[in-house]
Image: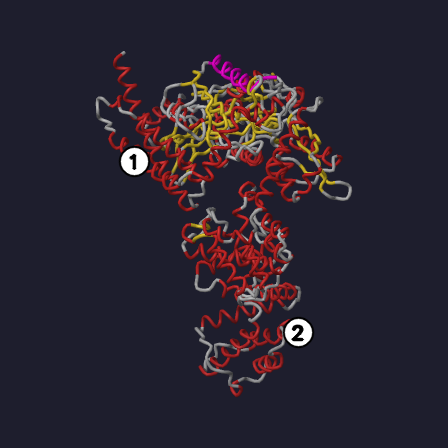
Amino acid sequence: MSLPFLLEVGTEEIPDWMIPGALESLHLLFEKAEIPHETVRLDATPRRLVLRAEGLPERQADREERILGPAKSAPAQAVAGFARKQGVKPEDLATESNSKGEYYVFVKKVAGRATKDILAESLAGMVLQIYFPKSMYWTGKSGPRFIRPIRWIVALLGDEIVPFELAGVRSGALSAGHRRLGSPEIAVTIEDYDQRLRDHYVILSAEERRQRISKDLSTMRAKADPALLETLVYITEYPTPICGSFDPQYLELPEEVLVTVMRHHQKYFSVEDAQGKLAPKFVAVMNIDSDPEGFVRNGNERVLRARFNDARFFWETDQKKKLADRVQDLAHVTFQAKLGSYLEKTERMMALAKDLGGDTRAVRAAELSKCDLTTELVKEFTELQGVVGGLYARVQGEAEPVWQAIYDHYKPESMEDSIPRNRTGQIVALADKLDTLRGCFRVGLIPTGSRDPFALRRAAQGVVKIMVEGKFDLPLADLIAGDEALQSFVEERVRFYFKDACGFKYDEVNAAMAAGWSNLVDLEARLKRIQDLRSSPDFEPLAASFKRIRNILEQAKFTGEGSIDESLLETGPERDLYDEYRRIAGQPIEAVISQLRPKVDLFFDKVLVNAPDALIRRNRLTLLNTLLKEFSTIADFSQIVTNF
Amino acid sequence: MLSFQDIVFKLKQYWAERGCIIQEPYDVEVGAGTMCPETFLRVLGPQPYRVAYVQPSRRPADGRYGDNPNRLFKHSQLQVILKPSPEDVIEQYLGSLEAIGIDLRQHDLKFEEDNWESPTLGAWGIGWQVMLDGLEITQFTYFQQCGGIDLDLVPAELTYGLERIAAFLQVRDSVYDIEWTKGFSYRDVRYLDELQYSVYNFEMADIATLWKLFELHEGEATRLLQAYDPKSPEKKRFPLLPAYDQVLKCSNIFNTLDSRGAISVTERVGVIQRVRKIAVGVAQTWLNQQQEALVAEEVAR
């Protein structure tokens, strides 16, 4: 008979962002327990992690265990002793022969254990092994650790409770409803579980909660925000969106500030009017079914008003001192203990901006870029650093390229994020990131494994992205010269960018970078050429030949000195290859690949490179080396993985 | 409508009925109710304890001369410590909201992750900020460590922001318009505190004097900690509570210097370390003193 299984771990409110990972972890642990089953389904709300499975056997299959006894030749006493130990008569023993001879064997029939017993033994351990990025203890210092206290457990196999205890909580068939709308204790069976929860205002399925929020969001003209939506899906058991409004006078504040207050501080969606402009409205998602008296809407409106008032207070206070007058204040803001203040960083960035080809505007933007760190608004909304500086620079009359550069200079903040919109901003962003990288590596703050407190990977990735997409025709290697650790760190980011972000094949990236990677614009162009070349039928065979040439040169320990002596060339394939080389030298490989390939093939087919005559051998090696060098300026083709 | 003081009475009554000792505010200036010995020292060790008190909490940097409707130099926290935390701690907490007239079926309540940490006290915990209709009204923390020491029993700490709750219940946009009691607004009672302390903290506090005071209090705490003899039969008499007062003085002076803009970011870490050192010293010594006292009591019995 096959049985359904239900496990519900009832907890206090789990942080929303940890829930999907916890379910994944629970799923893996369940699969690892090797309990046969057909389907598994996982669900969660902030207060419960739920695993349901179908098709569990009532018992595990019976099996046989073979216990090896004495040899057939052993004295009868020993055989009797063995039989007695197994609780049978000697005549009931079987025999078995292996490489060493014939032996007595006892075939023990082991009845399959009840699945319920196996579950009862393993569930507590399984639950406690669920991975959370942070955990706590609550029953006392030596007690179990979990993300939040466990308050109830439902564990049912068919109609029966799977009995076990965890952190002082006994498993049972009692679940709990919504904290305020449901009952704290509700008896459930596997069949009525969903419905019972629903009756008590818990929507178990995240997808259903998502739909419930989404359908209102569009009618309320809320701006799409998938990350916020996920947060709200996992912070509620019975989500209901409501629309509130605020005084249009606050629209005088920059939209960036308003949206940040709503999104990050209040978890509200912002709303657009018919023209796509920010409307004086917001959408909050309640964890309750309705708001008939408008209490919740009024309350949220008041909170938002207070928040906007604060923001306006900061905005107005900050205006009293211009950004330009704040530069010296940066002397009191530490960038990093060993790297000095932000004033020093600013000075380094200004010099670097000039080195990167920046004009006076770039230098001006670099000078003002960090000044917003001293403003009240950024102290309050740190996530708006840069943006706030840009906004202040705009009202204080800085030129458009300058304020835009300040606004954008933390970009790109991720691989998906765009680079600064104008050249000035790109230069300032590069100067900022390069300075951070050079400084941190110089004083030994080098990321290890997952520890990267100064987000240097992101900085390096940003440098690469800006230089490629902004078409900076500059030698990157020179900008980070003299620091080997930094060079290889950045090289790794270049590789990652072209491989994972741009989708070039790894061997193409290896081949192109082996021919140099300092100028990223040039590198990108070469990569595109290789990608195009790859579709040519001659490419892989030729690449294979290049690999062969490289191997031959390496085995011969060829140093590459000397030049080709034409008189030593043999008429036929060798001479033909040489003539072909002379004819096509200096031309792009795309134009000549189809003529070159047969000549190379023929050469390897007919000519013995390792000729007995040392001079001839040497001359042939020189020919191959010359050929390899000629076509290795775009890539080291021997790095291409081929099927030949 | 409940006045500000009615809310305080009701909450104290509620928690008294659930076995809490009702304490009065601690008489040394603190930045939060957590810093009072009733929390900082009582959460250490294996003895159960339940206490509730209102603690005026000073945050020099948050002063706004009485101009900002939501920010205060000195706000009032109702601090509740339930050690160990009962299984129904959240239900009890929700009951306290009902007790001050919040109908939870008509309002939106959410528990949002917010882990509390105080580097100066070597203390941290796991918990939430409790949001009522989008307003943070309580910090709920399961203490894990205090004075750098893992706690034997895990206490639940509930910290109610009384001004916010009162403004919410009385539907006021400014804390200054809260009715403290009939005929007196919050402004009548507290405005001068806000104005004068803002002037002092931001403009007039003498930096050199404050540094000198900081060092004196730090020195006194250090001197006492060094004088403690764990082997002394008389160690129960040893004045650790006064030593802890010196820690609190240092912490408040540090906050004042900070609001005065006298501490650079680099220095900051160092000064926090200095306060932490004496705070952790007191916590460890306290544990030693209490453990011996417990053993002695048991032997006597």
Q: Residue at x 51, y 24 (%)?
A: A150
Q: Picture quarter containing residue A210?
A: top right
Horizontal and vertical percent position of residue A247: 70, 35
Chain to which mark 2 belongs: A
Q: How would you rate the neighbour count of disc 2 (Cα within 10 Å): few for under 14, some for 14-19, many for 20 or more?
A: few
Q: Which mark is residue A591?
A: 2
Kindly report the distance in space between the C-alpha atoms of the residues bearing marks 1 and 2. Answer: 83 Å
Q: Find numbered disc 1 in the image and state the secondary structure of the residue it sits on.
A: helix
Q: Is A624 placed left or right of A251 in the picture?
A: left
- The answer to whether A580 is drawn above or below residue A169 in the figure is below
**Residue behind mark 1:** B219
Foreground mark, 1 or 2, reads 1
Residues drawn in magenta: B1-18
- The answer to whether B102 is drawn above or below residue A126 in the figure is above
Horizontal and vertical percent position of residue A221: 74, 38
Residue toward you, A516 or A566? A516
Horizontal and vertical percent position of residue A536: 66, 66
Q: Find numbered disc 2 in the image and state the secondary structure of the residue it sits on.
A: helix
